Image (spheres, rainbow, N blue to C red):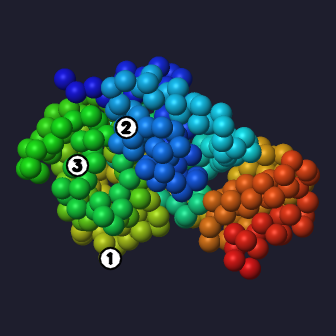
């Protein structure tokens, strides 16, 4: 029987692995680059981060030493930058309800409101939770089946029908939840395949389609209703958050000791980049301050760099 991701990891190893995934995204460094500075191979490091490496203890020490010597986002108090926001709480609650009643959830939101961070944290905090991320290069039926198989620790064959059946068999009766982030990239056939897999489990696994406004409209807009009629009738939970809450920006500011600049961060959070831009400005301002107090001028200079002004 194939083992589930992180099944053989200690709690500390899982924490380090998920931190490594977040660090990779925050630093925009590739696996080969990170492998070089940690003294491992890129395939080993990638497997460790995704919870599938068979000997995690051998990698844990190297990654820990790397973090000890790096002034990364954790040192600037911005790891899991929006983990305490109202938006993340709402997303987490809906994912939990979806898993509990084994339904399909559609979670749509504007860029930067915290969807991805919320999904990752939700998966890290529980069992029988799997996350895949769609992209233009991973939008077809075969690509999605491959990603799902990797997430649940299952080998694949060169046949979509066989892979779909095996996935349904493995997911059946798990009472788990499969989350597809950036699902606006999924093709119509890929979405229908995901629905078919859930149907084959006799509705014993939950599905969450997470993405931008296109994801939400696909299941409510009358012009697309016919295309997704089968899956639309199965959606039990919906969420559409097209902007950050004022409280989100304030929470973000207070969390990093930038309470006096919460109004400035709120103004940035209302722009196209949402809380993501506000987070980047805060990170940059803290870095530019170099341990000194962050001033209004520092915030303005950071925003000029992030916003390109």
Q: Quadrant of residue 153?
A: top left
Assess whether mark 2 and mark 1 are in contact (beta carbons under 8 angstroms): no
Q: Quadrant of residue 57?
A: top left
Instruction: Report how far apart the C-alphas of labels 1 and 2 lie in the structure.
Output: 46 Å
Residue 125 placement, left or right of 167 = right
Q: Residues within 10 Å of mark 2 (few under 14, many from 20)?
A: some
Residue appearing at x 20%, y 32% in the figure: 170
In the rendered view, tell whether residue 135 sits above or below residue 180: below
Give the numbered dot on residue 196: none
Residue appearing at x 74%, y 59% in the figure: 284
Give the residue at mark 3: 146
Instruction: Report how far apart the C-alphas of labels 3 and 2 lie in the structure.
Output: 19 Å
Quadrant the C terminus occupies: bottom right
For marks 1 and 3 on the same chain, the one whose residue lies earlier in the sequence: 3
Q: Secondary structure at mark 2?
A: helix
Give the residue at mark 1: 223
Residue 125 location in percent, x, y?
51, 31
Residue closer to the observer: 78 or 261: 78
* Foreground: disc 1 or disc 2: 2
Q: Secondary structure at mark 3?
A: helix
Give the residue at mark 2: 44
Q: Residues within 10 Å of mark 3 (few under 14, many from 20)?
A: many
Assess whether mark 3 and mark 1 are in contact (beta carbons under 8 angstroms): no
Instruction: Report how far apart the C-alphas of labels 1 and 3 lie in the structure.
Output: 31 Å
Residue 34 placement, left or right of 176 = right
Quadrant the N terminus occupies: top left
For marks 3 and 2 on the same chain, the one whose residue lies earlier in the sequence: 2
């Amino acid at each position: 029987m194939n083992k589930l991701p992180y099944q053989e990891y200690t709690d500390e190893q899982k924490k380090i692995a998920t931190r490594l995934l977040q660090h990779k995204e925050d630093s925009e460094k590739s696996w080969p680059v990170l492998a070089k500075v940690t003294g491992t191979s890129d395939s080993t490091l990638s497997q460790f981060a995704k919870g599938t490496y068979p000997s995690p203890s051998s990698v844990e020490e190297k990654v820990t030493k790397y973090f000890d010597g790096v002034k990364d986002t954790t040192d600037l108090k911005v790891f899991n930058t929006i983990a305490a926001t109202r938006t993340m709480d709402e997303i987490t609650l809906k994912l939990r309800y979806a898993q509990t009643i084994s339904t399909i959830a559609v979670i749509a939101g504007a860029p930067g409101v915290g969807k991805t961070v919320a999904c990752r944290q939700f998966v890290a905090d529980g069992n029988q939770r799997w996350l895949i991320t769609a992209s233009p290069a991973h939008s077809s039926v075969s690509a999605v089946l491959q990603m799902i198989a990797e997430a649940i620790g299952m080998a694949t064959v060169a046949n979509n029908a066989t892979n779909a059946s095996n996935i349904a068999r493995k997911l059946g009766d798990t009472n788990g939840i499969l989350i597809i982030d950036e699902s606006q990239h999924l093709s119509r056939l890929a979405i229908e395949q995901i629905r078919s897999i859930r149907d084959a489990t006799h509705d014993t696994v939950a599905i969450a389609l997470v993405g931008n406004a296109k994801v939400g409209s696909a299941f409510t807009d009358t012009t697309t209703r016919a295309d997704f009629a089968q899956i639309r009738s199965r959606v039990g939970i919906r969420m559409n958050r097209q902007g950050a809450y004022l409280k989100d920006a304030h929470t973000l500011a207070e969390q990093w000791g930038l309470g006096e600049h919460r109004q400035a961060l709120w103004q940035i959070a209302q722009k196209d980049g949402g809380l993501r831009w506000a987070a980047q400005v805060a990170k940059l301002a803290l870095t530019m301050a170099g341990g000194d107090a962050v001033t209004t001028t520092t915030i303005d200079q950071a925003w000029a760099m992030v916003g390109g002004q």
